[in-house]
Amino acid sequence: MDNTSIENTSEKIINSSLSLGADQAEVFVTKSRILLGRFMNRQQEVEEREAQGIGLRITKDHGVAFVSSSSFDKESLVSLINRALKIAKTIKMPFNINFPSPSKPSTVNGLFDKKIDDLNTAELMDSMDIMASAARDYHNSIREVSGCLRTVRQETWILNSNGLEVSSTETFFESYISVLAKQQTEEAEGFDSTAGRAWKAFFPGELSRNASRMAKSGFHSSRIENKEYQLILSHEPTAEITSLLNALTSSLLSRQYYPTFRLSENNDIASAKFSFFDHQDEPSGCGAVTFDDEGIPARKIPLIVKGKFVSFIYDTLNSLIEGKSVTGGANRNPLKYPLMSNVRNPPIGLLPRRNYAAPPDPIGLNPSIQPGSEKTEEMISETKDGLLVEMMHYPGRTTKDFSAILRMGLSKIENGEIAGSIRSCRFVADIVKMLRDIDMISSEQKVSGSWFSGMHEAPAIRTKARIVSLT
């Protein structure tokens, strides 16, 4: 279906919903082209597909309903409207929900790259060749290399019966690589990841060398003493913290899963050096947008400023539930937050950024920790007894037990210098205490993350936590 047909169909669905009794109707449509490549050692596979779908949200007599479909034929769309009207009779709210009114979208540069749009299967395979070769060439101990590379072009339309009508075309890429090194009887792992909005920001060789360096540095590791250490968390672990904070500052998720965090509202919950925003209109930002997933113009939403908690994120529905003002930040991306279901945590590459099959929830679109003024090298040189942490595994998702396995990219710092790798251990911490113990934040930022946390631009930070050896 071409773009004109999508817009005309969306208007017809809104009008038909109203004529059949809906008080309001909202249509959310996405159309995506996805290239997904995977490689393991010298084997590659690339999948190219296009997908489109429509989500319909209606209100009727205090009722609200959301339904979706990947089919645009007349019979499927009639069924879509009827299902929504039926659901709205059973799900009632104690208030009227008013969908957003029209407003001018923000101007945000760098969200579309023609090179990504024009990328073909052969070019994607060439990039994966570079990744695999750069890893193998780094050192003769590198034995196994695997990873993936995904590019997406996505068009989005939001229309509602209040006259709101916005659309955008965006591109992005993301990539992961895992490396296994062997040396005599020892094995060590390495990992790196990145994402971006422009193809020129992707450096496949650098990504692979970083993962291989991490693996090579893991040989001859030593056991660590169980105690509290200063931790310098590199970009990937800080991206994991960003992901947790994104859930904690969601009005919906904090209310459902983190009620104790509600006690932190209006309190100092972090170091005065620490600030956290949903920077939706950051130019070229990894998760930046021109409007949120209800059509509200993108902006920079302050959540924690100089250590003080400022606000939760509220979409239209949750602002009414709690009697608060809408902040913006409605999000239909199921890859960005840790709700425990198969729909909300699909494998990498299954869904693009904005998903027509997900109703809007309030959570940051482009969450980011404000960078500081130090260099990572300065942070290391000013640490007498600590650890450099480059990778977290299986981080906990509670405030009192924010713990994780550290099994690769873990180094001892002694008197301001890296003093060798450390065997597997676990850090155990209270997330608020970790935030309050932050005393240094790097000026450098990097887009990093994992399949679980999603990708975020993050600095390095220095804080404290107790470490428990696992060997």
Image: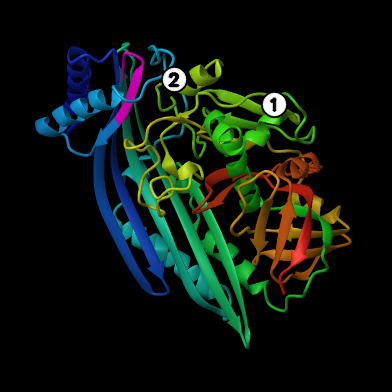
Left or right of residue 459: residue 117: left
Q: Identify residue for label 2.
A: 296
**Lower position in the chain sequence, tag 1 or tag 2:** 1
Viewer-proximal residue among 351 and 111: 351
Q: Position of residue 258 (x, y in %)?
A: 61, 37
Q: Residues within 10 Å of mark 1 (few under 14, many from 20)?
A: some
| Numbered circle sitting on residue 204 | none
Give the residue at x 50% y 36%. Answer: 284
Left or right of residue 7: residue 125: right
Kind of residue indicated by mark 2 = Ile
Q: Identify residue for label 1.
A: 265
Look at the numbered disc 2 and give the secondary structure of its residue: loop
- Above or below residue 308? Residue 469 is below
Q: Main secondary structure of the magenta part?
A: strand
Task: Give the magenta range.
Answer: 59-66
State the image quarter where residue 443 is shown: top right
Give the residue at x 40% y 23%. Answer: 294
Which quarter of the rendering shows the N terminus? top left
**Looking at the image, what colour scheme do you see?**
rainbow
Left or right of residue 437: residue 57: left
State the image quarter where residue 354 is shown: top left
